[in-house]
Image: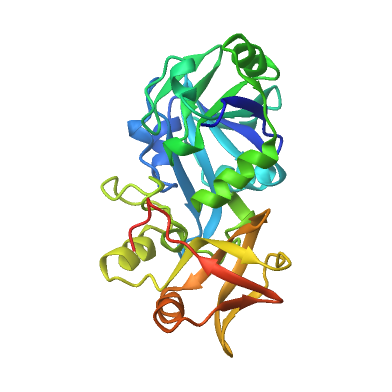
Amino acid sequence: MTAAVFAALPSRAVLAVAGEDRKTFLQGLISADVLKLSPVRAGYGGFLTAQGRFLHEFALVAAGDTILLDVEAARIDDLAKRLKLYKLRAKVTVQPRPDLEVSIAWGDGVAARFGLDAAPGTSREEGGGAIFVDPRLAELGLRAILPSGRFAEIASAAGLAHGDPAAYDALRVKLGVPDGSRDLQVEDALLLENGFDELSGVDWKKGCYIGQELTARMKYRGLVKKRLVPVAIDGPVPAAGTIVKLGEAEAGEMRSAAGNMGLALLRLEAMEKAKAEGIPLQAGDATLTPHKPAWANF
């Protein structure tokens, strides 16, 4: 049993897209189906290069006449700038909202504490923002976009104690879920190698968006050759970017880590060979044991 706790998430920030064309504007740009957003349904998606490479990822919620994006705080200005390049004559505004903060809550029964069904993406509007079950996995708990300090008041009233964001990060790594540019190399990573299909980050019926052609081709032609997976680490924790080897052959690359668990982008063929032949994967002086997440489909 894991007690339900909450924390602010200063590594994330809020970008607001407002105006009467907000949905059609975003619909042609990102991998999520923006038209499915509602006061009771949040979403998740990515913004890609024309070649289908990763630029940004975010959760999205509808809040009145605004769509709020939960984005990487350190890269919010880059996303705003890129979106504005496509504004043209669309009646939209794209602005950071420093008055709003992203918070999280996780642990047993946490959704019920806030009157929410536990299904991913279940949402409710709250005071100019929203509280919602993480659209990727219910096991990640809740996210909230609210005025600074407001979620702490609501969560405390619901009986939750303050939690350690490092414990949440360890949960994320154990589940095999990427965290923005910590795990996805900008202008290089591919969504389907990093679980976006199973994590509800790509809608296959919505029509065209930037990078859609390559993303669809990878899925329907079976071109995914690598996957981001959790790895148990025996030895010193390798830095992000450390090459993973199977014998003398390159098998992949390390990404983020928390404690003795990490994420690594590994070649599927190498993982199969390591398991079949009992050959350990090595990253620096550490031995890695990969684990396929329960939600993953490969």
Tell me which corner region of the image, top left, top right, bottom left or bottom right, holds residue 285. Answer: bottom right
| Residue 53 visible | no
The residue positioned 32% from the left and 61% from the top of the image is 216
Q: Check the image and report above or below for 266 versus 195.
A: below
- Residue 232 coordinates in the image, percent (x, y): 58, 62
Tell me which corner region of the image, top left, top right, bottom left or bottom right, holds residue 153. Answer: top right
Query: Foreground residue, 24 or 131?
Result: 131
Tell me which corner region of the image, top left, top right, bottom left or bottom right, holds residue 147. Answer: top right
Query: Foreground residue, 264 or 194?
Result: 264
Is residue 224 toward the left or the right of residue 145 in the image?
left
- Residue 274 coordinates in the image, percent (x, y): 46, 79
The residue positioned 43% from the left and 55% from the top of the image is 293
Query: Foreground residue, 171 or 135?
Result: 171
- Residue 9 coordinates in the image, percent (x, y): 67, 34
Q: Check the image and report above or below for 104 versus 112.
A: below
Give the quarter of the figure containing the C terminus.
Answer: bottom left
Q: Check the image and report above or below for 66 versus 185.
A: above
Please, which residue is most extreme toward the top here? 157
